[in-house]
Amino acid sequence: MISTRTIESIRADFPLLQRTQGKNPYIYFDNAATTQKPRSVLDAARVYYETLNSNVHRGVHMLSQQATDAFEESRRVIQRFIHAKEDREVIFTKGTTNGINIVAHGFSRAILKPGDEVLISGMEHHSNIVPWQMACEYTGAVLKVIPLNDRGEIIYEEFLKLLTPRVKILAVVQVSNALGTVNPVKEMIADAHRLGIPVLVDGAQSTQHLRVDVQDLDADFFVFSGHKVFAATGFGILYGRAEWLDKLPPYEGGGEMIKEVTFEKTTYNELPFKFEAGTPHIEGALSLAEAIRYIEGLGIDFIAARETELLSYATESLAQIPEVIPVGTAAHKASVLSFNIRNAHHLDVGTLLDKQGIAVRTGHHCAQPLMQRFGIPGTVRASFAFYNTTAEIDAFHQALVRSIGMLV
Ligand code: PLP
């Protein structure tokens, strides 16, 4: 479905986009860090507290049952959104980082042995590096890294060479937060599966931009964060193929994740509850379900097409500025424009843009090894969502030219 709504009416759904700085509308180009929330998502959390607030799964009373129904309906909405086969394969987490830690912890307890390998790519976010380093440290496994070319793409032949029977898991980002590169994860999964290697996909930057179908990808694990998909912070999803989730031990112990507890022994609950110890982020789940309804109302194809248009408009706009050095020029990109300014520090550029009412991110974007690969301390990153406009990109261009005038 393609939305026929005007961009003005879509922007009106987002209270924060109505903010101004001085006389000018505030320009928010930090969507890869977190996205703004439509009113329907904000209302979902408020309505939950006003009408349903009670703890889920445990109560016999009406409120608890209604809250549980709404909570579990959210799981089914999310299941349909990523096209998981079963709702028990959708685990509620605190976010992408938490999801990866659950899997890495499980692998370190149940799968990895000394000499085994964990394969990641050279463009991973720290949250898809450090949990695996920790897993390797505990088990004696070795972390291997797929190298990148100068455009910021995986060198596929090198990936194939690194794919050996020693690899016990491949963990790879679908869309790079620092470069915008869209990786060929479906192809990578097919190649990994030929050797029986399971694959975790870091979808922190993909579900908000592209249609994700975990069964079509054939992913074994897929993780993402609600706050990057127009929903609340502190909530996210770990999708796992049931056979794999059954094999892994729980990450945290406590209420909800048990079947029976004695002082001698505890038996664990079935999926998804085995991985959901403690009172969950109930309004987080409701808010993500509402955000998905919002995305589906616009149409993910509309969103993808609009963002492609914004990214190519912005790429062409910055190409007119001779001092701009793009970082990450992959053939297939989504929504992120990273760059440096010749003879200027990224932090100074970001600060001057901020003074002109434009929010961009500066720094290493939690991808220090990637910055080392490019021999730079960081970049300026503008990242777009469907609610951004070409007029905003024009204002950004002008503000950048003014900043460069002050700096170089
Ligand atoms: N992976 C990628 C590619 C990201 O962009 C991010 C956040 O920026 C994360 C993982 C971590 O997400 P969170 O902080 O929501 O857990």
Image: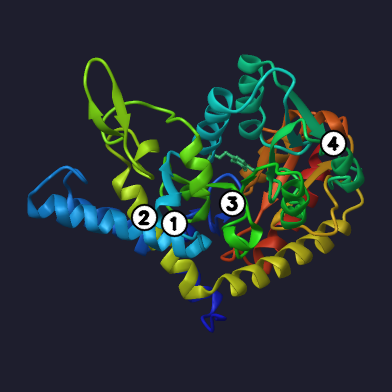
Between 93 and 256, the residue placed more toward the observer is 256
CB-based contact (under 8 Å), mark 2 and mark 3: no
Please indicate whether residue 10 sits to the left or right of residue 302 in the image: left
Of badges 4 and 2, nearer the viewer stands: 4
Q: Amino acid at mark 3?
A: Asn
Categorize mark 2 by other alpha carbons within 10 Å: few (<14), some (14-19), many (20+).
Answer: many
* Mark 3: few/some/many CA within 10 Å (<14, 14-19, 20+): many
Q: Which residue is mark 3?
A: 31
Residue drawn at x 71%, y 37% is 124
Q: What amino acid is found at the position of numbered circle 2 in the picture?
A: Ser
Cα distance, mark 4 to mark 2?
40 Å
Q: Nearer the viewer, mark 2 or mark 1?
A: 2
What residue appears at the point 87 percent right and 54 percent down from the top-left corner? 321
Asked if residue 96 lies left or right of residue 254, the reply is right
Residue that numbered label 2 is attached to = 287
Label located before the other in sequence (2 or 1)? 1
The quarter of the displayed image where residue 325 is located: top right
Q: Earlier in the sequence, mark 4 or mark 3?
A: 3
Marks 2 and 1 in Cβ contact (< 8 Å): yes
Residue picked out by circle 4: 162
Instruction: Choose the circle earlier in sequence order: 2 or 3.
Output: 3
Q: Which of the numbered marks, if any, corresponds to residue 325?
A: none
Question: Ligand 1: which quarter?
Answer: top right
Q: Which residue is mark 1?
A: 37
